[in-house]
Amino acid sequence: MLPILNVGPLAVPVPELLLLAGVWFGLSLAEKHAPRRAFHTETLYNLVSVILLSGVLAARAAYALRYSSAFAASPASLLSLNPGLLDSGGGLVGGLLAGWIYGQRKGLALWPTLDALAPLLGVMLVMIPLANLASGGAYGAETDLPWAITLWGAARHPAQLYEASAAGLILARLFPAPGMANRPAGQDFLLLATWSAAARLLLEAFRGDSLTIFGELRAAQLAAWLVLAAALVLLGKMRAPREQSA
Amino acid sequence: MTPFPKHWNLFSAAMLLVGAAWIAVSARLPGAGAARLPAPQVGFPAPDFELGTPGGEPIALSDLRGKAVLVNLWASWCGPCRAEMPAIQRVYEEYASRGFVVLAVNATNQDSVTAAVDFAQALGLTFPILLDLDGAVSRQYGLRALPTSFFIRPDGVIEEVVIGGPMAEALLRTRVERLLEGMP
């Protein structure tokens, strides 16, 4: 666990640094794979910039609307750099909406666009658990297995490492090299969704901080199961025309 | 990882069935509901401590059970700590009557009592300033950067940890409102 790296007088937040590095590595990988989808690098960077910037602005606006009385008492807080003043749901909706509008204006087709973004998403799925490992968040359940790590006063599953390793394997398998065999449009994204959802479904069981609903069921597992089902159905539909023509 | 096994529908159904079974099985594994020892992390009981004010009055965190507590670790030489103190004071004044308490733990082992007291007096801080003379509480709370703030629920469980600063006033207000939700 290393939430802060002290460099001279500077206290650098390691989790945020890892996430930024993830965006950089992810964009680099996506850039290498973009030509396979006939996707211009410049369009890719513009799209990601629009999504990120709009997402942050929408997240702050949504938070300010939700807690308007707190911001009315302190309007300067609207410009604060505190990440705690962001609404993740609002940011997600705002970022996706801005990305969709940008795509419509540029005439981008949905599946090739999602495929172009898939390497970036894949890298972030590796970096997010590593950021959690640095902050001590998303920790594992207690265990006496020999590879347990000591965290928050107990020997625990290294759940963050399980997740990062699984995401790394999926990333390496799906995007081994830019010159790999072409898959039909949409399959890069849907395969990433399928295997990432399956990994989440499996590995969430080893978390010690899962949100539970309906008694003891883990909410993240249920969400992953739904994503897995949707991805499998869509992949199956993509397969059908090939079967029919065969 | 061939995208399409020969019997795709069968493969999909099997994957979803196994997934559903695993959700049911893993609900019985120890994890989210397990008892937690005190630790300076969200979702864990806040480690207890007792420190003295500059006037010598001892205050224990455990005595504040039932109240919403902000433990703020700070030092007088730390710019972000100085910057966020006026906002903490304003929010404290507004919410103290509803059961909000601030414990401003000065990391005295890397500061001085005189500097801490002078700073508190200059800003007119009315919440308790506690002196962590030997750094024991800083170590207990895993202090890595100043300021660091712990928002603690009335049941003694840590709701949020904010490393670094300055915290915006709106952040303080929303967190305190959340801590006070459900309190009589």
Image (cartoon, coloured by chain):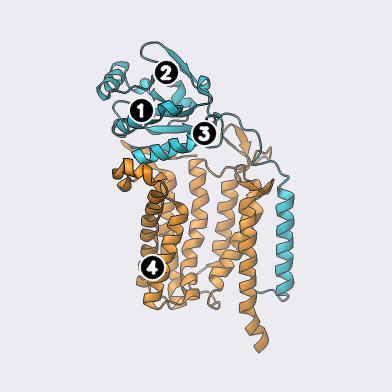
The residue mark sitting in front, 2 or 4, is 4
The residue mark sitting in front, 4 or 3, is 3
Residue A107 drawn at (x, y percent): 40, 78
Which residue was labeled with disc 1?
B93
Question: Helix, strand or loop at disc 3?
Answer: strand
Q: Reading the chain from its start, which is encountered first: label 2 or label 3? A: 2
Residue A31 seen from this side: no
Report the Cα–Cα distance between label 3 and label 1: 22 Å
Which residue was labeled with disc 2?
B134
Are circles 2 and 1 on residues that touch, CB within 8 Å? no
Q: Reading the chain from its start, which is encountered first: label 2 or label 1? A: 1
The tag on residue B158 is: 3
Residue at the (69%, 37%) spot, across then down: A144
Report the Cα–Cα distance between label 2 and label 4: 52 Å
- Chain letter for the residue marked with disc 4 in the picture: A
- Chain letter for the residue marked with disc 3 in the picture: B
Question: Helix, strand or loop at disc 2?
Answer: loop
Whether labels 2 and 1 belong to a single chain: the reply is: yes
Apparent colour of chain B: cyan
Residue B10 drawn at (x, y percent): 74, 71
